[in-house]
């Protein structure tokens, strides 16, 4: 096994800090500070893979979007462990290939390439639509793995994520003791819902979330695959308006800028704006005085490609 300085790597650099935003106090769990490369939500979900003895593994097999936070985190994980990452995508847009060629590329794709990731385009076979094609391809691939290959479901939605999230839960409990918080509410935005559902399982506090990818019923389906007892699901918050994942919205950029100005902390641009908008709506509706802990789930490398898009649109 590769020599890893595990103590220096994980799970000890995520302080909980008190911030003020829009005139209210919040506590922030700084999972964005876990490690410069391997941080946030994906580091928690893949923590098991960083720590476990896995002598037979030489190659990670992942898939998903070409600018996904999980691409970068898997690349960092592979690098730290001395493994190869083969990451399958439907398509690498020509502008992105061009940007890499001219060394102007930024964000998760570029950062993953720099870490040595092997990013493979899956050719579209006849009569298949795009999403189905990659899913079918990966399903077949996951059933025909070589002994040295380890398959990671998209976004890390799998049971092995539970260990790292249980660790996060136990840190939150001791952070609460330190800050003398009695009945806090936990808030974090969801993609696959893996983090939220396992956090709720391991915490004695209420967990709130919102659906950034798909709608609430999609998120409930994801919960159901990991937790059959509905009473243990996190509560899904709504906003009046519907948002589509990866699209740009003026109100997202606005709240992201406000957060930066008032807290001096950079948040992520895909998940956090909806997380904060949903939370503020909830606080307005319920007028709760309970302490709120918001989990900063990292993903800031993705801002390198998102921010220029926002700036082009709104200056
Ligand atoms: C992946 C990710 C999420 C979503 O996590 P899930 O466990 O899939 O719900 C939220 N925020 C950030 C910054 C992420 O990278």
Image (spheres, rainbow, N blue to C red):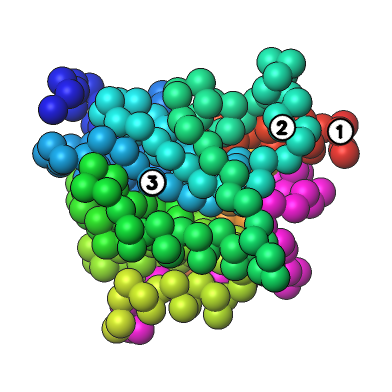
The tag earlier along the polypeptide, 2 or 3, is 3
Kindly indicate the quadrant of the structure image that contains residue 48: top left
Residue 262 seen from this side: no
Question: On the image, numbered disc 2 is attached to which residue?
Answer: 96
Q: CA distance from mark 2 to mark 3?
A: 22 Å
Query: Relative to residue 313, is residue 83 depicted above or below?
Result: above
Number of other residues with Cα within 10 Å of mark 3, as a class: few under 14, some 14 to 19, many 20 or more: many
The residue sitting at the top extreme is: 103
Question: On the image, numbered disc 1 is attached to which residue?
Answer: 312
Choose between 244 and 210: the one closer to the eye.
244
Q: How far across and how far down the image is residue 87, in percent?
A: 47, 42
* The magenta segment: 230-255
Tag of residue 84:
none
Number of other residues with Cα within 10 Å of mark 1, as a class: few under 14, some 14 to 19, many 20 or more: few
- Is residue 66 magenta-colored? no
Number of numbered discs visible in the structure rendering: 3
Q: Are marks 2 and 1 in contact (CB under 8 Å)?
A: no
Q: How far across and how far down the image is residue 17, in percent?
A: 39, 36
Q: Is residue 37 left or right of residue 286?
A: left
Question: On the image, numbered disc 3 is attached to which residue?
Answer: 61
Residue at position x 46%, y 30% from top? 117
Where does the C terminus fall, quadrant-wise?
Answer: top right
Q: Is residue 142 left or right of residue 313?
A: left
Residue 123 seen from this side: yes
Query: Relative to residue 190, is residue 201 depicted above or below?
Result: below
């Amino acid at each position: 096994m590769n020599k890893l300085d595990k103590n220096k790597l994980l799970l000890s650099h995520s302080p909980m800090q008190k911030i003020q935003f829009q005139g209210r106090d919040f506590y922030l769990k700084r999972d964005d500070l876990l490690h410069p490369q391997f941080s946030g939500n994906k580091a928690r979900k893949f923590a098991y893979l960083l720590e476990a003895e896995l002598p037979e593994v030489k190659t990670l097999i992942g898939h998903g979007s070409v600018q996904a936070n999980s691409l970068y985190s898997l690349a960092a994980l592979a690098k730290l462990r001395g493994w190869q990452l083969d990451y399958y995508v439907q398509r690498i847009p020509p502008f992105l290939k061009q940007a890499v060629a001219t060394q102007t590329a930024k964000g998760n794709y570029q950062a993953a390439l720099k870490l040595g990731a092997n990013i493979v385009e899956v050719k579209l076979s006849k009569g298949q639509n795009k999403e189905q094609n990659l899913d079918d391809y990966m399903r077949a691939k996951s059933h025909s793995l070589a002994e040295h290959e380890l398959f990671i479901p998209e976004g890390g939605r799998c049971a092995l994520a539970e260990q790292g999230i249980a660790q996060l839960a136990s840190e939150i409990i001791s952070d609460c003791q330190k800050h003398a918080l009695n009945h806090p509410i936990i808030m974090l935005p969801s993609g696959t819902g893996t983090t939220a559902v396992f956090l709720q399982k391991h915490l004695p506090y209420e967990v709130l979330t919102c659906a950034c990818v798909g709608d609430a019923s999609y998120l409930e389906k994801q919960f159901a695959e990991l937790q059959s007892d509905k009473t243990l699901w996190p509560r899904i918050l709504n906003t009046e308006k519907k948002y589509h994942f990866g699209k740009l919205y003026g109100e997202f950029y606005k709240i992201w800028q406000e957060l930066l100005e008032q807290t001096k902390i950079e948040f992520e641009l895909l998940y956090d704006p909806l997380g904060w908008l949903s939370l503020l709506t909830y606080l307005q509706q319920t007028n709760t005085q309970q302490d709120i802990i918001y989990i900063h789930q990292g993903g800031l490398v993705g801002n390198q490609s998102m921010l220029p898009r926002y700036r082009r649109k709104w200056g």
